[in-house]
Amino acid sequence: MTLRVMEKGDLASFVERLIASEPGAVGPVRKDGKHVFARLASVEDLDLAYTTTLLPPKKYLFPPQETLLRFRLGAPPVVEPVLEAPPLVVIGVHPCDLRGIWATDRAFGDDHVDTNYRARREAITLIGADCLPDEHCFCTSVGSHLPEPASFDLFVTDIGDAVTVEIGSERGRALLERYARSREATAADLAGLQKRRHAKEAAVKARLNVDVQMLPLLLESVSTSPLWEQLGAKCLSCGNCNLVCPTCYCFDVGDLMQLNLEEGERIRRWDGCTLVDFATVAGGHNFRREAKSRVRHRYYRKFQYLMTRYGRSFCTGCGRCSRSCLAHINPPETINALLAEAEREEA
């Protein structure tokens, strides 16, 4: 780990130079009592003292809606692929969202590379920032409370009078050398970094009562639990949990025709497994017609299917789904209830 240190005033100057010199910069901005990632006009817009944003920075890598190609009918028809990946600096990305980006990197780049996603990923510079959790965060239970290695270019941690800056890539190193004034970290700086991380861990109140690595086995034994029926009866199938999740990457694809019926666009937009029609296939058949099966699928996707493949939770513990769920369904309570049920049956 290469670690540098900046004074607080130098951090502000660094951000100001980034905004002025780079093609585009976004970061957490306070809006109507909430925080959102948005364009930064000046360093005064940036608010790093936030717990979470409404949507994760995933929206810059995998937009809620994007055009994949444009076409024009004729003899022969004309098809033009659309690939928009402008350079962008994203400032203030929390460790849980860096884990989310790691997950979407797997989804769009492991077996089949998605050219649109990959182009945006390569065009984006990620500057992470540490945080202090609220009552909904359970990042320590899923191991996403520390910055995900190889997922960021720079990572900033507030240690009081100064900030540590971890360099995660050559791109990040170049930005730091070009725009910032920094110094080597001292023993006192390292002690301050550890103190900050311990304080963060102590601040996490929501927890899973089981080692996250045991969840695939636990879920294997509770697939017919009555809890799924109870959660299905509560779930409104609104899709809020899918929309705010940093690791949900399902989408739908469709064509939009112009009124002349000669030109159009093929677009893709976010979709979600908790929506009523998500699992509807040809012939109108829906193999997850009941809400309980959709809720269960969401949990198995985060904590079993993909964990079995990658050995890591695909829930980042950010708490966005807990905050946005109108039915007050949340992962820690659900997992802990399933664990308690399994222990009772075993006893």
Image (cartoon, rainbow, N blue to C red):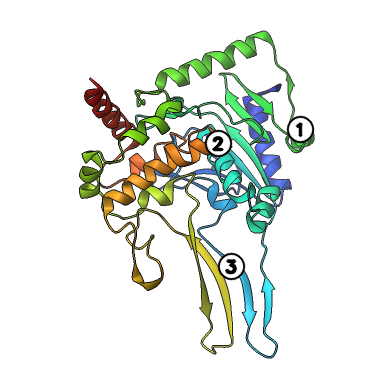
For residue 67, the mark is 3
Q: In 3D space, how far apart are the residues under numbered discs 1 and 3 (Cα atoms)?
A: 34 Å
Question: What residue do we see at 73% from left, 47% from top?
Answer: 21
Q: Of the residues shown, which amino acid type is indicated by label 2?
A: Tyr
Q: Dot 2 corresponds to which residue?
A: 310
Decide: few, some or many residues near mark 1? Use Cα within 10 Å; few <14, some 14-19, many ≥20: some
The front one of 58 and 8 is: 58
Question: What residue do we see at 52% from left, 33% from top?
Answer: 312
Q: Earlier in the sequence, mark 1 or mark 2?
A: 1
Q: Dot 1 corresponds to which residue?
A: 173
Q: Position of residue 332 (x, y in %)?
A: 33, 31
Q: In 3D space, how far apart are the residues under numbered discs 1 and 2 (Cα atoms)?
A: 30 Å
Q: Of the residues shown, which amino acid type is indicated by label 1?
A: Arg
Decide: few, some or many residues near mark 3? Use Cα within 10 Å; few <14, some 14-19, many ≥20: many
Q: Which of marks 2 and 3 is nearer the N terminus?
A: 3
Direction from residue 196 to residue 203 in the image, left or right: left
Question: What residue do we see at 57% from left, 79% from top?
Answer: 264
